[in-house]
Amino acid sequence: MTRTMLYGFVAGFVAVLVFHQGTAFLLHHVGNGLGPSVALFGRVPPPFNMAPVPPLGVPQVISIAFWGGVWGALLALLLRALPVPALLFGLLFGAVVPTLVAFTLVASLKGLPLWAGGNRQIWARALLYDGAWGWGTALLLLRPLRLRG
């Protein structure tokens, strides 16, 4: 179980840097120039935000990667325990669970509007970024880290 959680943390951390922020990179550099993309996702800020975040002052992207690692440990435990298609489960888990927690619990703790204030573009971006993270985490757990089999 400890190995599973460690692999999950590593996979989740790396998946933020590669898949989550990679999706943000594509939306920023390509999507911002496409009308339909802007209509769906809004204007996307640059990825890899290095602005410090409280309370420790670490760069925002590192904070997100840390929490991606925490979620990755949970995802790894679920993938180990449940007989589900890993990539599909990772995509759906990533898109739904962290997004709902961010739009409720985290928003409440940070004094932000619940449910992203009803902004559908923020919802679309969050579902895409977090879904990409979940899929990437599951992929890393299956391939390089060989969590199953």
Image (cartoon, rainbow, N blue to C red):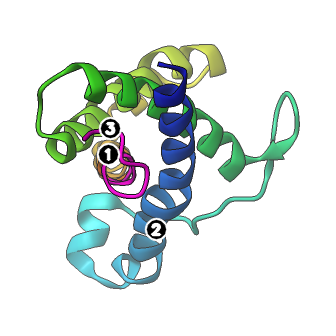
Q: Position of residue 48 (x, y in %)?
A: 64, 63
Res 123 → quadrant: top left
Q: Is residue 73 left or right of residue 149?
A: right
Give the residue displayed 23% in from the left and 44% down from the top.
Answer: 91
Which of the two residues, 28 or 17, is positioned nearer the viewer here? 17
- Give the residue pinned by disc 1: 138
Tag shown at residue 22: 2
108 or 68, which is in the foreground?
A: 68
Above or below, 30 relative to 5 = below
Specify which label sits upstream in the sequence, 3 or 1. 3
State the image coordinates of residue 65 (x, y, percent, origin top left).
Answer: 61, 45
Q: Where on the picture, by quarter, is residue 148?
A: top left
Q: Residue at x 87, y 40 (%)?
A: 57
Circles 2 and 1, Cβ within 8 Å, touching? The answer is no
SS of the residue under disc 3 = helix
Residue type at numbered disc 3: Gly
Is residue 99 rendered to the left or right of residue 112? left
Q: Residue at x 37, y 46 (%)?
A: 141
Residue shown at the point (47%, 36%) measured from the top left: 8
In the depicted structure, whether residue 76 falls above or below residue 141: above
The three-letter amino acid code for the residue at tag 2 is Gly
Q: Could you say whether the residue bearing mark 2 is in a helix, strand or loop? A: helix
Mark positioned earlier in the residue sequence (2 or 1): 2
Q: Is residue 32 inside the magenta stretch? A: no
Distance from disc 2 to disc 3, alpha carbons, whole Å, reads 15 Å
Q: Quadrant of the C terminus?
A: top left
Q: Residues within 10 Å of mark 3 (few under 14, many from 20)?
A: many
Tell me the residue that label 3 is attached to.
94
User: Which region is colored magenta?
Assistant: 136-149
